[in-house]
């Protein structure tokens, strides 16, 4: 098989995010990506676009320190403080978001998507638009502003930017946390599967938790059959790990639904 190069991802280690930051930042140029940031209650079509500056090398996080108890990829102190989160995106760039996306795709065994993201950055010399859009979607989802998260997702599609599995994951988990957005959560979960992307246990468990909380068990069973028709098989061990800190009605309800116990 002369002339064919085979790439293989090594298992992730504690130093992987730091190494990726160094590798990405060594060749990724500053580029501008137009993404809609709206802090208003309504997200109208005439909202201003804000330019996100990617990968400012002078503001990259410090190298990995094995004696530091802080996580390598830090989450915002207050996920509802969108002003602070968007300010950091503008001033510090999106390298951290790219590393988090690569890390999540790799851990879920989505080698093809992880490598695709990696080589887009290395070959084209800038962060793909999917990184910026997903970062904004995740910010809105974590702040419980599900309408804005969906609007950014739809604008992302309209712009011709294809979401990856991590994009769907952050969107679906955010929607599942809001009772009024449960229909959208399972709609996008089915859409994700229709595109050939496998949801991880954290993603689909969040949706079935929402069904149990809202006591929509018949709808949950019907939805489960729709997923199984697309080849879905729930992983009992992984689901129990997701639910390891939850007991009572939610724990029993999700286990009963997924595994008929």
Image (tube, rainbow, N blue to C red):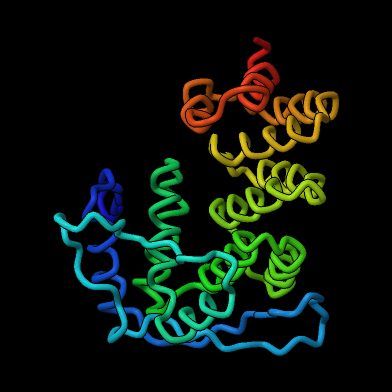
Residue at the image point whose x is 44% and y is 82% from the top: 54
Q: Nearer the viewer, residue 99 or 229?
A: 99
Is 178 left, or right, of 9 in this rendering? right
Return the residue found at the far top.
Answer: 261
Which quadrant: the C terminus?
top right
Q: Residue at x 45, y 58 (%)?
A: 101
Q: Quadrant of residue 72?
A: bottom left
Where does the image place residue 90, in percent across and percent down from the top left? 49, 85
Q: For residue 154, which quarter of the picture? A: bottom right
Q: Is residue 239 above or below residue 172?
A: above
Q: Nearer the viewer, residue 192 or 119?
A: 192
Using the image, determine if residue 202 lies above or below residue 75. above
- In the image, residue 201 lies at what x, y percent? 54, 34
The location of residue 114, given as percent across then percent down, is 42, 54
Left or right relative to 86: residue 184: right
Q: Nearer the viewer, residue 150 or 42?
A: 42
Q: Using residue 250 as the reference point, say whether residue 8 is left or right of it.
A: left
């Amino acid at each position: 098989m002369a002339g064919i190069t085979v790439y293989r991802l090594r298992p992730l280690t504690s130093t992987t995010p730091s190494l990726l930051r160094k590798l990405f930042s060594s060749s990724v140029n500053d580029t501008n990506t137009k993404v809609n940031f709206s802090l208003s209650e309504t997200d109208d079509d005439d909202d201003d676009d804000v330019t996100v500056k990617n990968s400012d090398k002078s503001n990259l996080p410090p190298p990995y320190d094995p004696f530091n108890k802080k996580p390598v990829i830090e989450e915002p102190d207050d996920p509802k403080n969108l002003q602070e989160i968007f300010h950091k995106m503008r001033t510090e760039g999106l390298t951290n978001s790219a590393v988090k996306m690569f890390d999540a795709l790799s851990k879920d065994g989505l080698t093809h998507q992880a490598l695709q993201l990696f080589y887009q950055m290395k070959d084209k010399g800038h962060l793909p638009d999917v990184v910026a859009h997903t970062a904004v979607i995740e910010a809105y989802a974590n702040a419980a502003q599900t309408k804005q998260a969906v609007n950014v997702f739809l604008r992302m599609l309209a712009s011709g930017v294809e979401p990856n599995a991590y994009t769907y994951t952050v969107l679906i988990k955010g929607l599942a946390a809001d009772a009024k957005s449960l229909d959208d959560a399972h709609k996008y979960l089915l859409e994700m599967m229709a595109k050939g992307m496998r949801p991880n246990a954290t993603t689909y468990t969040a949706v079935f938790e929402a069904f149990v909380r809202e006591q929509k068990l018949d709808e949950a069973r019907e939805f489960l059959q729709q997923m199984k028709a697309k080849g879905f098989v729930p992983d009992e061990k992984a689901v129990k790990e997701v639910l390891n800190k939850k007991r009572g009605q939610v724990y029993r309800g999700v286990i009963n639904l997924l595994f008929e116990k």
